[in-house]
Image (cartoon, rainbow, N blue to C red):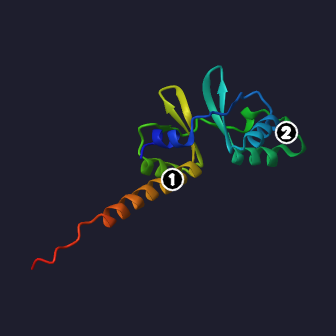
Amino acid sequence: MLVSEILAIKGKVLYTIAPNKSLGEAVAVMTEQDVGSLVVFDHGTMTGILTFREVLTGVNSGGARWAEMPVAEVMKREPLTADGSMEMDELRKLMVDHHQRYLPVMEGTTLMGVVSFHDVAKAVLEEQSFENRMLKNYIRNWPAESDEA
């Protein structure tokens, strides 16, 4: 399965934020939209990603003023990205090796979406379920041996 197929299953809704917005605003968007990441865009260019990991780092380092901190202070700059033509196994290895739960999917300089480890797990389950149904159907329709011996 390709990354582009995972995006097709998940949908391509994108949640973004500007680097000059506050961490409090980012948390409000993440909570309202029930997402674990926001892609940070500045003048049409991806400059980073903000995940709950960076939010927690900001809360820890910002103390009582964490909500006022600009996203740019805590975002992950130049995040790893995936390509739509990447195989799911390669994507999983990249995510595990680099301890990344969210990866932006890029086509050149265009953001196509974000895949999460949850999206990958869901795609694996759907793929296995499909293969399981196909195998059961194959076995069920296996020709019976004849008694001509």
Q: Quadrant of residue 58?
A: top right
Residue under label 2, please give it. Answer: 67
Instruction: Specify whether 147 is left or right of 136.
Output: left
The label on residue 97 is 1
The label on residue 35 is none
Q: Please, which residue is most extreme toward the top here?
A: 43
Q: Please, which residue is most extreme toward the right here?
A: 64
Q: Secondary structure at mark 1?
A: helix
Residue at 44%, 48% in the rendered image:
88
Residue type, label 1? Asp
Residue at 62%, 29% in the rendered image:
47
Residue 99, position as x, y percentages in the image: 57, 52
The image shows residue 136, relative to residue 112, as above or below, that is below
Mark closest to the chain's N terminus, 2 or 1:
2
Residue at 70%, 48% in the rendered image:
53
Q: Secondary structure at mark 2?
A: helix
The image shows residue 58, relative to residue 131, as above or below, that is above
Residue type, label 2? Ala
Residue 46, position as x, y percentages in the image: 60, 28
Residue at 76%, 27% in the rendered image:
20
Task: Give the camera-side residue of 71 and 126.
Answer: 126
> Is mark 2 in CB contact (under 8 Å) with mark 1?
no
Tell me if mark 2 has few (under 14), some (14-19) or many (20+) residues whose alpha carbon lies within 10 angstroms of its own. Answer: some
Q: How many marks?
A: 2
**Separation of residues labelled 2 and 1 (CA atoms):** 31 Å
Task: Give the camera-side residue of 134 and 4.
Answer: 134
Instruction: Specify whether 10 is left or right of 64.
Output: left
Q: Quadrant of the C terminus?
A: bottom left
The image shows residue 148, relative to residue 36, as above or below, that is below
The image shows residue 109, relative to residue 74, as above or below, that is above
